[in-house]
Amino acid sequence: MKEQLTAIADKIKDLDPVAALRYFAEAYKGKIVFSTSFGWEDQVITHMIFANDIPIDVFTLETGRLFPETYYVWNRTLEIYKKPILAYHPQAELLQDMVNAKGPNSFYESVENRKQCCYIRKLEPLKRALGGNQLWVTGIRAEQSLNRHDMSNLEWDEQNQMVKFHPIFFWSLDEVKEFIKKNNIVYNTLHDKGFPSIGCAPCTRAVREGEDFRAGRWWWEDQSKKECGLHATT
C-alpha cells in the first residue's frame, strides 16, 4: 500500500486542489466521498467540489447537538449550490438506550461516557457513510494540531481500510480565509467569535488567546490529544 500511495502522490504532486479532486473523482469513480462539518476548511472544499461540478458525494454527520449557526451554514450551502449534502444520523435505538440510561449530558461525567456518545453520534454513522467507498476526502490541515504534523495529504486509513486525501493539508489559516473571502463563501460565524474548531454545541467552546487550536473541544477533559476518533492515526 505504501508503494501505491507513493505512486498516486507522484501523480498529484503538481496539481492544485481542484485538479487533484478531479483526478481522484475519475480514478475512484462512484467510490469517493467528502465529509463536511461546515467549518472554514470544509466550506472551502465544498465550494471546490460543487462550483466545479466534480462528481464527489458530500455528506455530514447530523449528531443532533449542532450549533444553530452550523445549521444555518448547512441550509445556506444547499440554497447556494443547489446540490445535495447527505445527512447521516445516529441509530435511534442506540441513542435512545444511552440517553435513557445515562441522561442527555452523560459525556461530562467521564471520558468513557464521552467516547460512547462520540461513537453513537459520530463514529457509527461515519462507518455507514464511508461504507462501500474507497477514498475519503477531508478538510484536515497540518497546522490544526500537533499529531497532524506527522500526517501527509495522502494516507492509508487502516481503521476504515481506505485512502484519505486532504486537499488543503498544506494551507495556512490565512490562505483558507483569503479563499473564502475571494469566492464569497458562506461560513460559520462562530469562527469570528473564537471558535477555530466547531463540533457539537455542548462539547465546544471558544478558545482563549494563547490556547491550543483544539483547546475548545472537550475542555473539561485533561488530555493532551483531543480527538474523537474520526481521524484516528495508526
Image: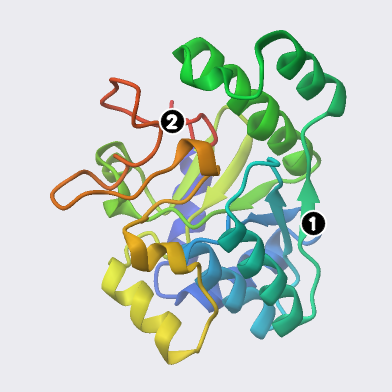
Q: Is residue 42 above or below residue 47?
A: above
Q: Position of residue 211 (x, y in %)?
A: 18, 45
What residue did someone put label 1 on? Answer: 86
Type of the residue with mark 2: Thr
Q: Quadrant of residue 118?
A: top right
| SS at mark 2 in the image | loop
Q: Quadrant of the C terminus?
A: top left
Q: Is residue 21 above or below residue 137?
A: below
Q: Is residue 103 above or below residue 126?
A: above
What kind of colouring is applied to the model shown?
Answer: rainbow
x 55%, y 14%: residue: 113
Q: Residues within 10 Å of mark 2 (few under 14, many from 20)?
A: some
Relative to residue 206, is residue 66 drawn left or right?
right
x 71%, y 28%: residue: 124
Pick the front one: 92 or 101: 101
Type of the residue with mark 1: Leu
Relative to residue 135, is residue 7 drawn left or right?
left
| SS at mark 1 in the image | strand
Marker disc for residue 233:
2
Q: Residues within 10 Å of mark 1 (few under 14, many from 20)?
A: some
Pick the front one: 65 or 11: 65
Q: Is residue 63 above or below residue 136?
A: above
> Mark 2 or 1 closer to N-term?
1
Q: Are marks 2 and 1 in contact (CB under 8 Å)?
A: no
